[in-house]
Amino acid sequence: MKRITIKDLSKFLSLSTSTISRALLNDKNINPETQKKVVEAAKKLGYKPNATALSLKYGQTKNIGLVVPEMITPFSSKVLQGIQNILYPLGYRVIITQSDENPLIERKNLQLLEEFNVDGIIINLCHETYNEDLYKEIMDRGIPFVFFDRIPSKTLDVSKVVVDDNIKASLVVEHLINTGRKRIAHIMGPSTIRNAIEREMGYKRILTKHNIFDPELIIKTDGMMFDAGENAAKQLLDKKIEFDSIFAFSDTLAIGAMNYLLEQGIKIPEQVAVASFSGTELATIVHPKLTSVQQPLVKMGETAAQLILEKIKDISAPNQTIIMDTELVYRASTFH
Protein backbone atom coordinates (compact mmCIF):
# COMPACT_ATOMS: atom_id res chain seq x y z
CA MET A 1 0.00 0.00 0.00
CA LYS A 2 1.44 3.34 -1.05
CA ARG A 3 2.34 5.94 1.57
CA ILE A 4 -0.19 8.81 1.76
CA THR A 5 1.46 12.20 1.17
CA ILE A 6 0.43 15.81 1.68
CA LYS A 7 -0.23 15.95 -2.08
CA ASP A 8 -2.81 13.15 -1.72
CA LEU A 9 -4.54 15.08 1.09
CA SER A 10 -4.42 18.22 -1.06
CA LYS A 11 -6.22 16.41 -3.94
CA PHE A 12 -8.72 14.76 -1.58
CA LEU A 13 -9.69 18.06 0.10
CA SER A 14 -9.09 20.44 -2.85
CA LEU A 15 -6.81 22.55 -0.63
CA SER A 16 -3.26 23.76 -1.29
CA THR A 17 -0.36 21.70 0.12
CA SER A 18 0.80 24.70 2.18
CA THR A 19 -2.65 24.97 3.83
CA ILE A 20 -2.55 21.23 4.62
CA SER A 21 0.99 21.53 6.08
CA ARG A 22 0.06 24.49 8.26
CA ALA A 23 -3.13 22.78 9.47
CA LEU A 24 -1.16 19.66 10.48
CA LEU A 25 1.36 21.82 12.37
CA ASN A 26 -1.43 23.62 14.34
CA ASP A 27 -0.70 26.98 12.73
CA LYS A 28 -2.79 29.52 14.68
CA ASN A 29 -3.63 31.45 11.47
CA ILE A 30 -5.56 28.49 10.04
CA ASN A 31 -9.34 28.48 10.27
CA PRO A 32 -10.25 25.96 13.05
CA GLU A 33 -12.90 24.40 10.79
CA THR A 34 -10.34 23.85 8.01
CA GLN A 35 -7.86 22.39 10.48
CA LYS A 36 -10.47 19.97 11.81
CA LYS A 37 -11.26 18.86 8.26
CA VAL A 38 -7.56 18.29 7.46
CA VAL A 39 -6.90 16.32 10.68
CA GLU A 40 -9.96 14.12 10.09
CA ALA A 41 -8.97 13.45 6.47
CA ALA A 42 -5.39 12.65 7.52
CA LYS A 43 -6.73 10.12 10.01
CA LYS A 44 -9.17 8.61 7.51
CA LEU A 45 -6.56 8.18 4.76
CA GLY A 46 -3.84 7.02 7.18
CA TYR A 47 -1.45 9.94 6.61
CA LYS A 48 1.82 9.71 8.61
CA PRO A 49 4.12 12.75 8.62
CA ASN A 50 7.58 12.26 7.12
CA ALA A 51 9.86 12.97 10.09
CA THR A 52 12.97 13.47 7.92
CA ALA A 53 11.27 16.03 5.68
CA LEU A 54 9.91 17.88 8.72
CA SER A 55 13.34 17.93 10.35
CA LEU A 56 14.91 19.39 7.22
CA LYS A 57 12.25 22.07 7.12
CA TYR A 58 12.15 22.96 10.81
CA GLY A 59 15.73 22.14 11.85
CA GLN A 60 14.74 19.56 14.49
CA THR A 61 14.37 15.79 14.27
CA LYS A 62 12.71 15.37 17.68
CA ASN A 63 15.18 12.51 18.19
CA ILE A 64 17.48 12.30 21.21
CA GLY A 65 20.45 9.91 21.27
CA LEU A 66 21.14 7.85 24.38
CA VAL A 67 24.54 6.17 24.79
CA VAL A 68 24.98 3.70 27.68
CA PRO A 69 27.64 1.10 28.53
CA GLU A 70 25.06 -1.70 28.92
CA MET A 71 21.34 -2.46 29.01
CA ILE A 72 21.70 -5.82 30.83
CA THR A 73 21.22 -4.54 34.37
CA PRO A 74 18.28 -2.38 35.51
CA PHE A 75 20.58 0.67 35.88
CA SER A 76 20.29 2.04 32.32
CA SER A 77 16.66 0.97 31.86
CA LYS A 78 15.62 2.90 35.01
CA VAL A 79 17.45 6.03 33.78
CA LEU A 80 15.81 5.55 30.36
CA GLN A 81 12.40 5.41 32.08
CA GLY A 82 13.10 8.86 33.59
CA ILE A 83 14.28 10.26 30.24
CA GLN A 84 11.12 8.99 28.53
CA ASN A 85 8.90 10.42 31.31
CA ILE A 86 10.07 13.89 30.25
CA LEU A 87 10.66 13.54 26.51
CA TYR A 88 7.82 11.32 25.25
CA PRO A 89 4.97 13.71 26.20
CA LEU A 90 6.81 16.40 24.20
CA GLY A 91 6.90 14.25 21.07
CA TYR A 92 10.57 13.23 21.26
CA ARG A 93 11.88 9.77 20.45
CA VAL A 94 14.93 8.22 22.09
CA ILE A 95 17.46 6.30 19.98
CA ILE A 96 19.28 3.90 22.31
CA THR A 97 22.83 2.68 21.64
CA GLN A 98 25.00 0.44 23.81
CA SER A 99 28.80 0.66 23.97
CA ASP A 100 29.44 -2.67 25.76
CA GLU A 101 32.05 -0.85 27.91
CA ASN A 102 34.11 -0.42 24.73
CA PRO A 103 35.20 3.15 23.83
CA LEU A 104 35.59 2.19 20.14
CA ILE A 105 31.95 1.04 19.96
CA GLU A 106 30.92 4.19 21.87
CA ARG A 107 32.72 6.24 19.21
CA LYS A 108 30.83 4.48 16.38
CA ASN A 109 27.54 4.99 18.22
CA LEU A 110 28.20 8.72 18.59
CA GLN A 111 29.07 9.05 14.88
CA LEU A 112 25.88 7.16 13.99
CA LEU A 113 23.74 9.46 16.18
CA GLU A 114 25.33 12.50 14.54
CA GLU A 115 24.47 11.04 11.10
CA PHE A 116 20.88 10.66 12.35
CA ASN A 117 21.05 14.40 13.09
CA VAL A 118 19.72 13.97 16.64
CA ASP A 119 18.78 17.14 18.55
CA GLY A 120 20.91 16.17 21.55
CA ILE A 121 22.86 13.30 23.16
CA ILE A 122 22.55 11.97 26.72
CA ILE A 123 25.51 9.75 27.59
CA ASN A 124 26.91 7.53 30.32
CA LEU A 125 30.46 7.09 29.07
CA CYS A 126 32.68 4.00 29.36
CA HIS A 127 36.11 5.72 29.42
CA GLU A 128 36.85 9.11 30.96
CA THR A 129 39.13 10.52 28.24
CA TYR A 130 39.16 8.21 25.19
CA ASN A 131 36.42 9.97 23.16
CA GLU A 132 36.79 13.48 24.55
CA ASP A 133 37.92 14.84 21.16
CA LEU A 134 34.74 13.50 19.54
CA TYR A 135 32.43 14.91 22.27
CA LYS A 136 34.02 18.32 21.59
CA GLU A 137 33.72 18.04 17.80
CA ILE A 138 30.04 17.02 17.89
CA MET A 139 29.22 19.80 20.38
CA ASP A 140 31.08 22.34 18.21
CA ARG A 141 28.88 21.23 15.32
CA GLY A 142 25.79 22.18 17.33
CA ILE A 143 24.59 18.97 19.00
CA PRO A 144 24.45 19.43 22.79
CA PHE A 145 25.54 16.73 25.29
CA VAL A 146 24.44 15.89 28.82
CA PHE A 147 26.49 13.36 30.80
CA PHE A 148 25.12 11.27 33.66
CA ASP A 149 26.66 8.92 36.23
CA ARG A 150 30.09 8.63 34.56
CA ILE A 151 31.43 11.95 33.38
CA PRO A 152 34.39 13.22 31.32
CA SER A 153 37.48 14.91 32.75
CA LYS A 154 37.21 18.37 34.24
CA THR A 155 38.70 19.96 31.11
CA LEU A 156 35.37 19.46 29.32
CA ASP A 157 32.74 22.02 30.34
CA VAL A 158 29.43 20.15 30.03
CA SER A 159 26.11 19.66 31.82
CA LYS A 160 26.10 16.60 34.04
CA VAL A 161 24.01 14.65 36.54
CA VAL A 162 26.03 12.81 39.20
CA VAL A 163 26.03 11.53 42.77
CA ASP A 164 28.69 12.15 45.42
CA ASP A 165 30.64 8.92 44.94
CA ASN A 166 33.42 9.74 47.40
CA ILE A 167 31.18 10.61 50.37
CA LYS A 168 28.73 7.75 49.81
CA ALA A 169 31.55 5.21 49.47
CA SER A 170 32.89 6.51 52.81
CA LEU A 171 29.49 5.86 54.42
CA VAL A 172 29.45 2.25 53.21
CA VAL A 173 32.92 1.64 54.65
CA GLU A 174 31.98 3.31 57.96
CA HIS A 175 28.93 1.02 58.11
CA LEU A 176 31.11 -2.09 57.62
CA ILE A 177 33.50 -0.91 60.36
CA ASN A 178 30.53 -0.27 62.68
CA THR A 179 29.45 -3.89 62.20
CA GLY A 180 32.88 -5.00 63.49
CA ARG A 181 34.70 -5.53 60.17
CA LYS A 182 38.39 -4.64 59.97
CA ARG A 183 39.70 -6.35 56.81
CA ILE A 184 37.52 -4.68 54.17
CA ALA A 185 38.37 -5.62 50.57
CA HIS A 186 37.42 -3.25 47.76
CA ILE A 187 36.47 -4.61 44.34
CA MET A 188 37.24 -1.54 42.27
CA GLY A 189 35.67 -0.56 38.96
CA PRO A 190 37.95 0.11 35.94
CA SER A 191 40.28 3.04 36.70
CA THR A 192 39.42 4.60 33.30
CA ILE A 193 36.16 5.88 34.84
CA ARG A 194 36.06 8.68 37.38
CA ASN A 195 33.49 7.07 39.71
CA ALA A 196 35.85 4.14 40.32
CA ILE A 197 38.60 6.51 41.46
CA GLU A 198 36.18 8.57 43.59
CA ARG A 199 34.75 5.50 45.34
CA GLU A 200 38.24 4.11 45.95
CA MET A 201 39.26 7.47 47.47
CA GLY A 202 36.28 7.38 49.85
CA TYR A 203 37.17 3.79 50.81
CA LYS A 204 40.84 4.60 51.37
CA ARG A 205 40.12 7.75 53.39
CA ILE A 206 37.98 5.98 55.98
CA LEU A 207 40.30 2.99 56.39
CA THR A 208 43.29 5.32 56.75
CA LYS A 209 41.37 7.35 59.35
CA HIS A 210 40.79 4.12 61.35
CA ASN A 211 44.39 3.05 60.71
CA ILE A 212 43.39 -0.23 59.00
CA PHE A 213 44.18 0.52 55.34
CA ASP A 214 46.01 -2.25 53.47
CA PRO A 215 46.63 -1.73 49.70
CA GLU A 216 46.59 -5.54 49.26
CA LEU A 217 42.84 -5.45 49.85
CA ILE A 218 42.13 -3.44 46.68
CA ILE A 219 41.30 -5.73 43.76
CA LYS A 220 41.22 -4.01 40.37
CA THR A 221 38.86 -5.34 37.69
CA ASP A 222 38.83 -4.94 33.92
CA GLY A 223 35.13 -5.66 33.55
CA MET A 224 31.93 -4.59 35.24
CA MET A 225 29.76 -7.70 35.04
CA PHE A 226 29.19 -10.71 37.34
CA ASP A 227 32.20 -12.69 36.05
CA ALA A 228 34.55 -9.81 36.97
CA GLY A 229 33.17 -9.91 40.53
CA GLU A 230 33.65 -13.68 40.67
CA ASN A 231 37.26 -13.33 39.47
CA ALA A 232 37.95 -10.66 42.11
CA ALA A 233 36.66 -12.91 44.94
CA LYS A 234 38.68 -15.81 43.52
CA GLN A 235 41.82 -13.64 43.54
CA LEU A 236 41.29 -12.76 47.21
CA LEU A 237 40.97 -16.44 48.14
CA ASP A 238 43.77 -17.67 45.84
CA LYS A 239 46.22 -15.10 47.22
CA LYS A 240 45.14 -16.14 50.74
CA ILE A 241 44.45 -12.49 51.59
CA GLU A 242 42.63 -12.29 54.89
CA PHE A 243 39.33 -10.37 54.57
CA ASP A 244 36.06 -10.23 56.51
CA SER A 245 34.04 -7.99 54.18
CA ILE A 246 33.80 -6.62 50.64
CA PHE A 247 32.79 -3.20 49.35
CA ALA A 248 32.17 -3.53 45.59
CA PHE A 249 32.02 -0.76 42.99
CA SER A 250 28.65 -1.99 41.67
CA ASP A 251 25.82 -4.45 42.33
CA THR A 252 27.00 -6.69 39.48
CA LEU A 253 30.54 -6.97 40.89
CA ALA A 254 29.17 -7.55 44.42
CA ILE A 255 26.77 -10.28 43.27
CA GLY A 256 29.51 -12.00 41.22
CA ALA A 257 31.71 -12.02 44.34
CA MET A 258 28.84 -13.27 46.54
CA ASN A 259 28.11 -16.15 44.14
CA TYR A 260 31.73 -17.25 44.18
CA LEU A 261 32.02 -17.05 47.99
CA LEU A 262 28.80 -19.02 48.47
CA GLU A 263 30.04 -21.69 46.03
CA GLN A 264 33.18 -22.01 48.20
CA GLY A 265 31.00 -22.55 51.27
CA ILE A 266 31.69 -19.11 52.77
CA LYS A 267 28.70 -17.76 54.69
CA ILE A 268 27.42 -14.22 54.03
CA PRO A 269 27.34 -12.14 56.22
CA GLU A 270 28.59 -14.45 59.07
CA GLN A 271 32.09 -14.88 57.59
CA VAL A 272 32.15 -12.14 54.95
CA ALA A 273 29.84 -9.10 54.78
CA VAL A 274 29.19 -7.63 51.30
CA ALA A 275 28.04 -4.12 50.33
CA SER A 276 27.87 -2.30 47.01
CA PHE A 277 27.14 0.91 45.13
CA SER A 278 24.39 1.33 42.44
CA GLY A 279 21.23 0.28 44.20
CA THR A 280 19.38 -1.41 41.35
CA GLU A 281 16.68 -4.06 41.92
CA LEU A 282 19.46 -6.65 41.59
CA ALA A 283 20.33 -5.88 45.23
CA THR A 284 16.93 -7.17 46.35
CA ILE A 285 16.70 -10.37 44.28
CA VAL A 286 19.82 -12.08 45.63
CA HIS A 287 20.09 -14.03 48.87
CA PRO A 288 21.01 -12.59 51.25
CA LYS A 289 19.73 -9.20 50.03
CA LEU A 290 22.52 -6.75 49.36
CA THR A 291 23.34 -3.63 51.39
CA SER A 292 23.80 -0.95 48.76
CA VAL A 293 23.94 2.77 47.99
CA GLN A 294 20.67 3.43 46.18
CA GLN A 295 20.79 6.06 43.45
CA PRO A 296 17.57 7.81 42.29
CA LEU A 297 17.90 6.43 38.76
CA VAL A 298 14.51 7.50 37.36
CA LYS A 299 15.05 11.01 38.77
CA MET A 300 18.57 11.00 37.28
CA GLY A 301 17.04 10.31 33.84
CA GLU A 302 14.38 12.99 34.27
CA THR A 303 17.03 15.55 35.28
CA ALA A 304 19.27 14.65 32.32
CA ALA A 305 16.28 15.02 29.96
CA GLN A 306 15.43 18.46 31.40
CA LEU A 307 19.05 19.58 30.95
CA ILE A 308 19.15 18.42 27.31
CA LEU A 309 15.89 20.28 26.57
CA GLU A 310 17.42 23.49 27.97
CA LYS A 311 20.46 22.99 25.73
CA ILE A 312 18.31 22.28 22.65
CA LYS A 313 16.39 25.50 23.31
CA ASP A 314 19.59 27.50 23.77
CA ILE A 315 22.93 25.80 23.12
CA SER A 316 24.73 28.67 24.86
CA ALA A 317 22.75 28.16 28.11
CA PRO A 318 25.21 27.77 31.01
CA ASN A 319 26.29 24.21 31.79
CA GLN A 320 25.05 22.80 35.09
CA THR A 321 26.23 20.05 37.42
CA ILE A 322 23.33 18.49 39.31
CA ILE A 323 24.30 16.32 42.30
CA MET A 324 21.57 13.80 43.12
CA ASP A 325 20.97 12.57 46.64
CA THR A 326 21.45 8.88 47.43
CA GLU A 327 20.48 6.57 50.25
CA LEU A 328 22.45 3.79 51.92
CA VAL A 329 19.98 0.92 52.27
CA TYR A 330 20.97 -1.65 54.91
CA ARG A 331 20.10 -5.26 54.07
CA ALA A 332 20.96 -8.79 55.22
CA SER A 333 24.35 -9.06 53.43
CA THR A 334 26.05 -6.98 56.16
CA PHE A 335 24.10 -7.96 59.29
CA HIS A 336 24.33 -11.17 61.34
Image (cartoon, rainbow, N blue to C red):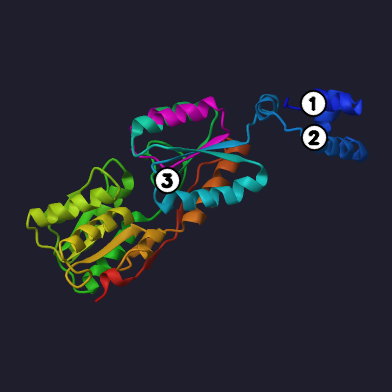
Q: Earlier in the sequence, mark 1 or mark 2?
A: 1
Residue that appears at 66% across and 45% down? 90
| 260 on left or right of 91 | left
Q: Nearer the viewer, mark 1 or mark 2?
A: 1
Kind of residue at disc 2: Leu
The foreground one among 267 and 333 is 267
SS for dot 2: helix
Q: Is residue 91 visible?
A: yes
Q: Is residue 108 magenta?
A: yes
Label 1 to label 2, Cα distance in Å?
A: 10 Å
Q: Earlier in the sequence, mark 1 or mark 3?
A: 1
SS for dot 3: loop
Q: Earlier in the sequence, mark 3 or mark 2?
A: 2
| Residues drawn in magenta | 107-133
Image quarter where the C terminus lies is bottom left
Label 3 to label 2, Cα distance in Å?
A: 37 Å
Q: Is residue 263 magenta?
A: no
The residue to which callout 3 is attached is 71
Q: Quadrant of residue 6?
A: top right
- Residue 24, numbered circle: 2
> Above or below — where is 153 with respect to 80?
above
**Position of residue 140 measured from the top left corner of the image (x, y, whole percent):** 50, 27
Kind of residue at disc 3: Met
Kind of residue at disc 1: Ile
SS for dot 1: helix
Query: Which residue is most to the front?
Result: 1
